[in-house]
Image (cartoon, rainbow, N blue to C red):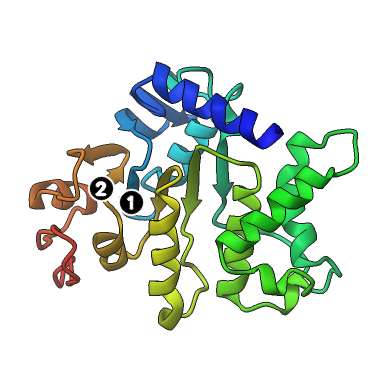
């Protein structure tokens, strides 16, 4: 019953607001250092948006603005038509750095259950919490390993578990910061195909340095280096990339794998 209520909430908000996430003229400074400059972005349900850009370009800060963890110096941010902090419960987040002791004796199942913590404050996990966690594990193909200690999994398996943890919150939007980091190249295609399936249920925003993978698997691409270069499509102009990376580039478009940065 609780799950059906949560799904109805998200569906009702989708019907009310055209964009699930909206940023309008957002700027962020850390002291005197500009991190985001006049960024505007619209994200819709079932979008799979890949955000690329150089180190220090503001990609992680952008995700934190959406989560309400960083307050903009100027501009407006809304999540499902409301305040990011109030509606953060509708966002699943997988950060770039996950600090945990690999020797700590916690099972895959219990890790995913912590994704229900916001629903289980000051109470025990309910049967619904456990059912939701198992459903999330099944969604990412990790249910057979639910009793395994998290530290005994491969990097790719651990990443699937942390995505399941985010999905256990029953989000309408999934934010991923460098999700393929630490995953063997041979299993990356399977991982990105999993994300492609998940976008049938939600919007996905993925920050990545893997430009080739982004060009193949996402449905829309943006480039961020303080300023956002975005055309609401999978195509970026050469001048956009050159402005962001500040070096000569080849055009990235149409999901064809190829080298983007020229020798420089």
Mark number, residue 220: 2
Residue 229 vertical placement versus 167 (above, below): above
Q: Mark 1 or mark 2, which is nearer the start of the sequence? A: 1
Whether the residues at callouts 2 and 1 have beta carbons within 8 Å, the answer is: yes
Pinpoint residue 226: horizontal percent, then vertical percent.
Answer: 32, 39
In the foreground, 238 or 16: 16
Left or right placement of residue 181 versus residue 50 in this view: right
In percent of the image, x 77 and y 45: which residue is there? 129
200 vs 113, nearest the viewer: 200
**Residue 61 in picture, x, y percent from top left:** 47, 40
**Disc 2/disc 1 C-alpha distance (Å):** 6 Å
Residue 43 visible in the displayed image = yes
Q: Residue at x 62, y 79 (%)?
A: 154
Viewer can see residue 75: no
Query: In the rendered view, would you say 256 is above or below 203?
Result: below
What secondary structure is marked by label 2?
Answer: strand
Q: Residue furthest bottom?
A: 186
41 horizontally vs 246: left or right: right
Quick one: label 2, few (<14), some, or many (20+) residues within 10 Å? many
């Amino acid at each position: 019953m609780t799950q059906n209520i949560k799904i109805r909430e998200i569906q009702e908000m989708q019907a009310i607001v055209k964009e699930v996430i909206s940023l309008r003229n957002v700027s962020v400074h850390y002291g005197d250092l500009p991190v985001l400059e006049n960024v505007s972005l619209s994200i819709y349900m079932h979008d799979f948006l890949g955000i690329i850009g150089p180190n220090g370009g503001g990609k992680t800060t952008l995700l934190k603005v959406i989560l309400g963890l960083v307050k903009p110096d100027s501009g407006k941010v809304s999540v499902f038509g409301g305040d990011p902090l109030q509606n953060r419960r509708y966002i699943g987040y997988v950060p770039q750095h996950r600090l945990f002791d690999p020797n700590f004796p916690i099972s895959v199942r219990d890790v995913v259950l912590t994704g229900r913590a916001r629903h289980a404050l000051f109470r025990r996990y309910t049967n619904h919490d456990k059912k939701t966690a198992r459903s999330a594990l099944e969604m990412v193909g990790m249910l057979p390993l639910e009793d395994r200690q998290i530290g005994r999994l491969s990097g790719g398996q651990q990443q699937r578990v942390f995505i399941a943890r985010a999905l256990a919150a029953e989000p309408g939007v999934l934010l991923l910061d460098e999700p393929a980091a630490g995953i063997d190249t041979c299993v990356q295609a399977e991982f990105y195909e999993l994300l492609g399936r998940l976008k049938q249920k939600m919007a996905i925003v993925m920050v990545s340095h893997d430009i080739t993978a982004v060009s193949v698997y996402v449905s829309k691409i943006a480039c961020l280096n303080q300023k956002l270069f975005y055309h609401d499509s999978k195509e970026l102009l050469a001048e956009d990339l050159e402005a962001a990376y500040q070096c000569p580039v080849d055009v990235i478009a149409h999901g064809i794998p190829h080298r983007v940065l020229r020798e420089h």
